[in-house]
Structures are given as structure tokens and as C-alpha cells.
């Protein structure tokens, strides 16, 4: 089982870094941090008001993958997770998918093994492309809760917020979804689009976007068949990893990260959650010893006579 998700963390812009590294203005009221802050606010001026939809943070995306194995029990049900590992990086998404591919082969689930590999994502286009490239035989599933969120968004475009008709319509579509009839939902959405008032252009555009998203991924929504096989239909494992590994450490109030430093800390978080500290310390110790030995080998004797001892002006 492979589950992949992404999370943006606040990253410092060049302007913020320049402000951090610049010389601090003198405090006109020594000993009073309160007045220093007021003076800084007057000097910088008021902040530019953000428009609706503007990003509050300069987010850099980290991709995280949770990998584990399931084993068939005596009752025929799949048990697990077994040997769960988490990996995350700010590198391009293909790098993370390649790490998952390497781990899959190490566990004996390579393309020639004949064993089942399932990958659950949120339907990201880039991830879909890399999965088709590296895992052509895998079952690729779109997280059912992600699709359900789109159903609610569609319903709010068609019915009044909070109305009984909205709830009734969404529940009916969810029944179709879990019954493996996602194609009927896409067809229903097409009919609704055709009947929609031409004056509601923004609503039409949003519904058309959701319809295209669903139509392209309808073959990855076979939730009835997946449940019959006792496979995953949601990405709860990686959602928990996103919250613990990234959100709780990198996305607190006022935080702004430098990407290179955040990458190092992110790797340490993965080592911690995977309980690999002992192996990591041993690896770091061996690597440091090898480097010291190599430096010792590179040393050469330049003179056969010792240099005179320093006098420090005593003579």
C-alpha cells in the first residue's frame, strides 16, 4: 500500500530574508520592547490588504508518502499495516514517487513479482503521470473523501446552503459513489450543466471544472470493488503523517522557513517517526569515521626537520 499527499509550508521570501539580515534600528525607548514594536510598525507602514483568494504565505510544497504492507489473515481479511515507513521531501514529486518505487522493489513487490500494489492519492495530475510511468501495473485510487468534498461543492452550486435538498442530493450521490457507479454521477453533472441558467457563468465554470476532473478519474473510483477486495479507498495513513510530520512542526504561527534548512529538518522528522534513530546515528558515525580516515590518508610529510617552537615574544 502506498499513499501520497502534499502539504505547503510557509517559506521566507527574499524580501523577508533581507529584512531579517539587515541591521536592526536602535530602540528609541531602551528596555521597552513594546515601544520598539510600535516604532517598527510606524516605519514599515500599514500592510497591504489582501484580496479574496490571495495567499497569506509563500508556501513551498512538500510531498509525503506512507508505505506499508498488508497480510491476509486466517479469516481472509487483510491485516496491517506492517512495516510502515514515511518519507517526505521538498524535491519534485517524481523524486518521492521514485523513492516509493525503490521501497516497493526492496520489499519484493516489483513488476515481476505478481503481487498487488495499490496507490491512493488525491488525483493530482503530476502524481498520476509519475505513477503511470513507474507503477504501470498498480491500482491507482482517488481518495473517496476527496471526491465527496467535490460532491458537496457541486451541491452548493445547485441548492441553497444548509437546505434539506442539498443534504438529500449529496447523500444520494454518495450512495452511487460507494456502489461503484461514479460514471452516473458524471452523467448527472453533465445534465445539470446543460440545464443551468446561462447567466451563472462562474457557477458553470466551476461545475465544468469538477466534471472534467471526475470524468478523467472515473476509472479510479471503483470503491465497491475495492471494498469487496478489502483494499483502501481513503488516505487516512498519509493524512495522519502530514499532520504529525509537517503541519505540527512547520506550520505554526509566525513561522517562515528557508527551503534548504526545512529539508534537513523534514528528513529528521521522518527518521523520528520511522523509529530509525539508532540506524541513523550508526550511519552518521561510520560516515564521519570514513571521512576522517580519508583525510588522514591525504596528509603528507612536507619537511623532515621540525619547525621551531613559537616564542610568543619571550626572547
Image (cartoon, rainbow, N blue to C red):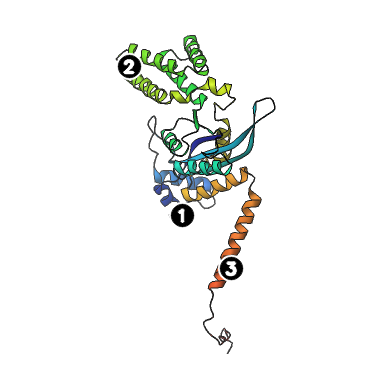
Give the crowd class for mark 1: few <14, some 14-19, many >=20 residues within 10 Å.
few
Which residue is tagged 3? 293
Residues at marks 3 and 2, CA–CA distance in whole angstroms: 72 Å
Residue 116: which disc? none
Residues at marks 1 and 2, CA–CA distance in whole angstroms: 56 Å
Q: Depth-wise, is mark 3 or mark 2 nearer the camera?
A: 3
Quarter of the image for residue 186 reads top left
Q: Is residue 215 above or below residue 259?
A: above
Which residue is tagged 1? 26
Q: Position of residue 279 (x, y in %)?
A: 64, 51
Q: Are marks 3 and 1 in contact (CB under 8 Å)?
A: no
Nearer-N-terminus badge (3/2): 2
Q: Position of residue 306 (x, y in %)?
A: 57, 86
User: Which residue appears at 54% of the width and 19% of the height?
Assistant: 224
Nearer-N-terminus badge (3/1): 1
Report helix, strand or loop for mark 2. loop
- Residue nearer the viewer, 251 or 287: 287
Quarter of the image for residue 285 reads bottom right
Nearer-N-terminus badge (1/2): 1
Which residue is tagged 2? 200
Give the crowd class for mark 3: few <14, some 14-19, many >=20 residues within 10 Å.
few
Question: If the image is split into quadrants, where does the C terminus sit?
Answer: bottom right
Residues at marks 3 and 1, CA–CA distance in whole angstroms: 50 Å
Q: Position of residue 26 (x, y in %)?
A: 46, 54
- Residue nearer the viewer, 237 or 226: 226
Q: Is residue 13 above or below residue 3?
A: below
Question: If the image is split into quadrants, where does the N terminus sit?
Answer: top right
Asked if one can make out residue 34 in the rendered structure from this viewpoint, the answer is yes
Amino acid at each position: 500500500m502506498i499513499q501520497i499527499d502534499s502539504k505547503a509550508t510557509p517559506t521566507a521570501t527574499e524580501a523577508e530574508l533581507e529584512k531579517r539580515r539587515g541591521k536592526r534600528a536602535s530602540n528609541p525607548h531602551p528596555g521597552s520592547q513594546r515601544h520598539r514594536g510600535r516604532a517598527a510598525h510606524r516605519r514599515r507602514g500599514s500592510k497591504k490588504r489582501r484580496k479574496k483568494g490571495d495567499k497569506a504565505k509563500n508556501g513551498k510544497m512538500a510531498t509525503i508518502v506512507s508505505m506499508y504492507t498488508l497480510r491476509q489473515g486466517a479469516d481472509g481479511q487483510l491485516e496491517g499495516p506492517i512495516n510502515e515507513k514515511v518519507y517526505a521531501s521538498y524535491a519534485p514529486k517524481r523524486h518521492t514517487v521514485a523513492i516509493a518505487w525503490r521501497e516497493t522493489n526492496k520489499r519484493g513487490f516489483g513488476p515481476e513479482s505478481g503481487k498487488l500494489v495499490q496507490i491512493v492519492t488525491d488525483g493530482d495530475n503530476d502524481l498520476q503521470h509519475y505513477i503511470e510511468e513507474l507503477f504501470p501495473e498498480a491500482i491507482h485510487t482517488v481518495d473517496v473523501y476527496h471526491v465527496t468534498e467535490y460532491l458537496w461543492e457541486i451541491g452548493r452550486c445547485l441548492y441553497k446552503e444548509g437546505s434539506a435538498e442539498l443534504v438529500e442530493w449529496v447523500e444520494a450521490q454518495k450512495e452511487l459513489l460507494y456502489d461503484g457507479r461514479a460514471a452516473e454521477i458524471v452523467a448527472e453533472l453533465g445534465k445539470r450543466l446543460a440545464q443551468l441558467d446561462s447567466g451563472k457563468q462562474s457557477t458553470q465554470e466551476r461545475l465544468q471544472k469538477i466534471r472534467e476532473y471526475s470524468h478523467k478519474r472515473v476509472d479510479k473510483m471503483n470503491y465497491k470493488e475495492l471494498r469487496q477486495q478489502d483494499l483502501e479507498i481513503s488516505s487516512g495513513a498519509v493524512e495522519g503523517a502530514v499532520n504529525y510530520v509537517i503541519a505540527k512542526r512547520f506550520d505554526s504561527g509566525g513561522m517562515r522557513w528557508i527551503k534548504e534548512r526545512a529539508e534537513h529538518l523534514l528528513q529528521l522528522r521522518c527518521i523520528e517517526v520511522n523509529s530509525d534513530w539508532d540506524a541513523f546515528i550508526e550511519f552518521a558515525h561510520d560516515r564521519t569515521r570514513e571521512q576522517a580516515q580519508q583525510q588522514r590518508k591525504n596528509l603528507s610529510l612536507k619537511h623532515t626537520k621540525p619547525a621551531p617552537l613559537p616564542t610568543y615574544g619571550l626572547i
